[in-house]
Amino acid sequence: MDIAQRVQSILLKPKEEWVKIKAEPTTPAELFTSYVMILAAFPAGFQLLGNVLVGRRLPLVGVFRWPIGRALGYAVVSYILWIAAVYLFALIINELAPSFSSAKNMTNALKLAVYSMTPGWVAGILYIIPGLWALGVLASLYGLFILYLGFDTPLMETPKKKIPGYMLLSVVVVAVLYVVFGWIVKGAFAVRYGRL
């Protein structure tokens, strides 16, 4: 798989790309090593650069730049949790399948989780400027559209009338997961290093 071509196609022509993805033979290990581990490094890496090089403007303090050790630790933990979140998202999609008259298929569930996260990962480049994180959130919302098109392909063989409920429940569960992961990362670094 050409990763640059896949990223471009899933962002610009998602409907057509899902048809190719559905027919493409792959394994979970291949998805992780050739796609997830590369793209999940974008938000973590650019956040590291933003925290160390650019810093944040704080009232009464001025510009605060993180110490390299703290920023690196935060980036590594965030990267690991991104990868774990993709797997858990796929697991949730797969386990919910029978409830929505869909076929359980972990590889296809993983394809849905992985490729729908592409816009958020690519927008991770914006984390180099800490104030632009909101644009990354908007890009992630485009990922919801990509996820919908993946369900509609239908990767999980979901009946059309059940797609909105299936997708909504999957997204709600993973959103809660992300909030919990965010608390874990922020809590771990707040306790160890003190708050900003």
Image (cartoon, rainbow, N blue to C red):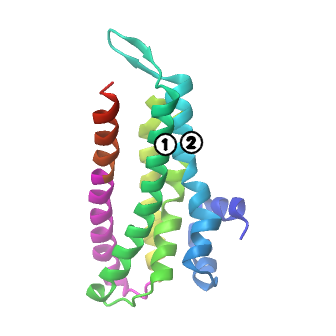
Mark 1 or mark 2: name the one nearer the start of the chain. 2
Percent across and percent down for residue 50 are 53, 30
- Is 93 placed left or right of 154 in the picture? left
Residue 167 falls within the magenta-colored stretch = yes
In the rendered image, which quarter is residue 178 located in? bottom left
* Main secondary structure type of the part rendered in magenta: helix
- Look at the image and give the residue range highlighted in magenta: 156-180
Q: Tell me the CA gap for discs 1 and 2.
A: 7 Å
Q: Dot 1 lies on which element? A: helix
Residue in the image at 62% along x and 56% along y:
38
Q: Which residue is mark 2?
A: 45
Residue 158 falls within the magenta-colored stretch = yes
Q: Compare residues 131 and 145 and report the one nearer the observer.
A: 131
Q: Compare residues 75 and 171 and report the one nearer the observer.
A: 75
Q: Amino acid at mark 1?
A: Ala
Location of the N terminus by quadrant is: bottom right
- Seen in the picture, residue 106 relative to 184 is either above or below; the reply is below
- Is 104 placed left or right of 100 in the picture? right
Percent across and percent down for residue 2 are 73, 66
- Residue 87 appears in the rendering: yes
Q: Which residue is mark 1?
A: 75
User: How packed is label 1: few (under 14 Cα within 10 Å), some, or many (20 or more)?
Assistant: many
- Is 4 placed left or right of 110 in the picture? right
The circle drawn on residue 100 is none
